[in-house]
Image (cartoon, rainbow, N blue to C red):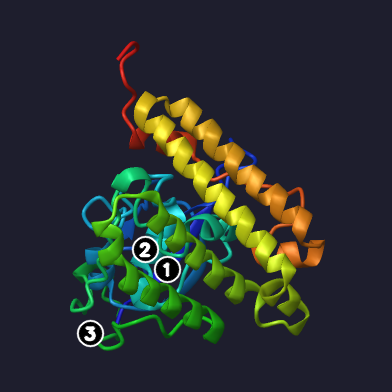
Amino acid sequence: MGTLVAFRYPTQLFLKLADHTYVACGTLGKAWGCWGGKTGGTELRRAPGSTRRADAIAEPNERAGITCYLVNGVCHQAANRILLPAGITVQGARGYSVSSALFGAYGRPRGILGFCRAPFDRHAGVGGDLDACIEAGRRDDAEGAGAPGGTDGGDPRERAYLERSLRLYAGSEERLAAVSGTDEIVRFQLAQFELFLEYKLGDDPRNREVVDGGARGALMEIREKTEHERLAAEQRFASSGDLDAFRRDDDALTLQFQNQVGKVLDGARYAALLDLEKGDDVTLADPEILENAYPRRPAGA
C-alpha cells in the first residue's frame, strides 16, 4: 500500500488568504494540484492509502469533482476527496476549518438552481498503487483501500466525522440531483454544519451548552443566513459574469461569517471551532485560481 501526503503552502501576496493545499504520494512521483500549484509545500499529514484510487478520485483535471471553484468548495475540499483512501484531511492548513464550516469536508454538491453539480465519485472498487507511487519494500495491492481509517495520528473523532459526512452524501446525492430548488441544498449544507459543530466542540463537556443549547441555535441561524446570501451571490455571478464582484461577495460573506460567529462564542470556543483567534480572519477566494477557473466575458457581453 502506498502513502498519500497532504501539503500546504501560504499565499504570501494575500495576507488574509487561507493556505493552498494539494496532495502527493509518498514517493513524490505523482501529485494532484487541487485547483492550484502542486510543488513547494510543507507536509501536513500522511497516511497509507491506495494511490491508484486517489488518482481515480482526482480525475484528469486533479480537481476531484469540485466542478466550480468557490461554489462547490476550494482546494481544501478537492484535497480531502483525493485523500479519502487514506482517511485523512488537510486539517491543520490555515483557514481549513472556515472552509469546512462553509463547504463541508468534501464540498458543496451543487450551487444555485442546480448549477455546478459536483458528485463525489468515491471509486470504492479501485485499489493498488500507481507505478510512480510504489515505495520500496511495500506491496502494490488493494489492502486497506476502503472507507476512512488508518489516519496518521489515529484520531477516532475525525474518522467518525468523516464517516458521518460520507453517509450524509450517500443519503442525499440522488435527491440533490433530482431537485433544482434552493431548499434542498440549504438543508444539506446545514446538516454538514451540524456535523462540523459536533466534531469540533462536542467532545469537551464545557462546550455542550454550545452544541446543545442556545448558542447552537444562533450559530445555525448564522450559517443558514450565510448560505442564502451565498446563493444570491451565485445568482448575481451567473447573470453578470462579474468575476471581481463574485470575489468581493465571497470575501465579504466569509469575513461576515467569522465576525458573527465571534459575537456568539467566547475566544476559546471560537478558536476551538475555527482554529483561528478572533480578529485573525481569513478569506478563501484565491484571485489567481479564480482567473483560471472562470473565463472573463468580453466587455459588453
The answer to whether the residues at label 2 and label 1 have Cβ atoms under 8 Å apart is yes
User: Which badge, 3 or 1, comes first in the chain's sequence?
Assistant: 1
Q: Nearer the viewer, mark 2 or mark 3?
A: 3
Give the vertical position of 286 relative to 31 (above or below): above
- The Cα–Cα distance between marks 3 and 1, rounded to whole angstroms, is 18 Å
Work out how far the residue at label 2 is from the one at label 1, CA to CA, in angstroms.
5 Å
Quadrant where the N terminus is found in the figure: bottom left
Residue pointed to by mark 2 = 24
Residue drawn at x 66%, y 44% is: 256
Task: Work out whether 229 lies above or below 173.
Answer: above
Mark 3: secondary structure: loop
Figure disc tally: 3
Across and down, in percent, residue 93 comes to: 56, 59
Which numbered marker is on residue 5?
A: 1
> Which image quarter holds the C terminus?
top left
Disc number at residue 142?
3
Q: Distance between the residues labelled 2 and 3?
A: 18 Å
Is 176 placed above or below 135 here?
Answer: above
Kindly tell me whether residue 120 is visible in this rendering. Answer: no
The amino acid type, in three-letter code, at marker 1 is: Val
Characterize the local packing of mark 2: few (<14), some (14-19) or many (20 or more) Cα atoms within 10 angstroms.
many
Residue neighbourhood size for the residue with mark 1, other residues' Cα within 10 Å, grouped as few (<14), some (14–19), many (≥20): many
Q: What residue type is labelled 3?
A: Ala
